[in-house]
Image (cartoon, rainbow, N blue to C red):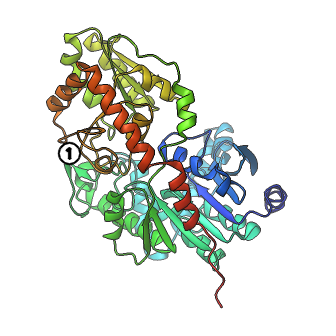
Amino acid sequence: MRDRLAALLAIARNRDLLVLSDRYPPDAIGGAEISLHLCLSRAELRHRTLVAVFSDNVQAPEIYWQDGVPVLRLPDADPWPIHASPSGRHRRVARAGRIARAAYEAISGARFLLTGGPPVQIADRAGAILFELTNRPRGGIASDFSLGRDWARRRAIRALAREMRPATVLLDNYRSILLAPDLRQSLPGSDLIAVVRDNRFTCARHDQSQSIGGTLCTACRFACAAEDATFLPKLHKRHLHLTAARRQHALATVDRAVVTSAFLHTGIAALNLGIQIERIPNPGGSLEEVAGHIRGVAEWPGQNLLIVGMLNENKGQLRFLEQAADWLRVDPARRVHLAGRGERIARQITKFAEAQGLTDQILLHGYLQRRALFRLARRCQVVVAPTVWPEPFGRVPLEAGLARRPIVAFARGGLCETIRDGVTGYLIAPDDYPAMLTQIETLLADPALCRRIGAAAHSHISERYGLDSIISALTTTLQPRPAPA
């Protein structure tokens, strides 16, 4: 692997900025990767950047180029708890038959149990395996604490660091930040910068919802363990505690952290990790590019709502549809369009629409590339963000504004920063669905109000989340540190 890495990195020589990202276009599934690429593809950063991602679709390192940005794909690790193996080995063994698979899993499990971390945590690792073999907590096992030194990602990133020796490393998002201690050891003189984009450093729960039974947590005491684990909740709580400690230790290893919202700044600062924290919001995007996407696109007749985002419980699409079913039935011209990935929730939404007789009014578009997404936004009259968790940042208000569309959202998390209530959209008290539907109906009944709010949103996003100003701030943050005298 090292010889191949050296050969590949020769293609991207003279680059001093390594960006380790959880995902990267064209394999993006959310706003985080889109925001990152909007910045790195600009001339100010493109010439000095190499992006590295882990992929379970490659067996050896390979490079592709995305809008002039070189992206190094590294083989990912097999799933926990056989994560010491590189991607695909488990599948290959499984194809050899049940006996070969069982033997491989038994050997890997024993190796993980005995050597997967500190000896004092053998009992904790045994408990994690017990959950894996019996009754998993809702959402999965909190296993970050047990990603030992033999984790295949850790070995790969140490090899990459030895070959590239970058002056600056940007660790974009949670899974990449977990590798900070390895990079600090391999690159003691490099500047490590973490970009925190979600709640996983302040909430160890699998869905990072920061809530229990629908009530937001004011402080994390891992009380969600009793709600998520019907089997041995105290053991699950122990794993949550260890996982939170592992994540925070990794974040404390970096030199500086960048957060995308004041909401995240407050949460990370409260951890008292002793690191410098800077807020740089996500960019809206190129005004010229978006204008080209939507030029000549006309609204659909009727009343069309758009909900954008991964289909999951946190984003609240299904709950909104359940609350809006009677409202939709009042007028067959009312339609809800949903754009985003998420097969599990998509199946539930399809089943709900069929049961309610609303298949013509609830339309699933799947994941859309940016051009198609902006064109869909222009065809709809109102964008809705019915999130039920504290959204860490949320790109949807930015995209709605660039498409000159008003947004109606629950007042949660970072959405309270990107929406100016009554000016660029409307913030509704959390979970007040009648008020949300009333506000949507008010907008739909007044096209002039829609246009006025949409125009104000466009001006607001252009001025406050303009790509040029955010690129300038990020470029300054990523300047190589002067060598110590």
Residue 465 lies, in percent from the top left, at: 44, 49
Report the side of 428 relative to 255 (left or right). Answer: left
Seen at 20% across and 45% down, the residue is: 214
Mark 1: which amino acid? Gly
Report the side of 188 relative to 346 (left or right). Answer: right
In this rendering, the answer to whether 359 lies above or below 422 is above
Seen at 67% across and 68% down, the residue is: 158
User: Which quadrant of the rendered structure holds the N terminus?
Assistant: bottom right
Report the side of 258 relative to 439 (left or right). Answer: right
Identify the element where label 1 is drawn: loop
Q: Which residue is mark 1?
A: 214
Q: Spot the residue most to the bottom.
A: 485
Residue 384 lies, in percent from the top left, at: 31, 31
Residue 365 lies, in percent from the top left, at: 46, 22
Seen at 39% across and 75% down, the residue is: 273
Based on the displayed image, in which of its 4 quarters is residue 371 positioned? top right
User: Which quadrant of the rendered structure holds the C terminus?
Assistant: bottom right
Q: Is residue 28 visible?
A: yes
Asked whether 41 or 311 is in front, the reply is 41
Residue 39 lies, in percent from the top left, at: 58, 51
Asked whether 206 or 210 is in front, the reply is 210
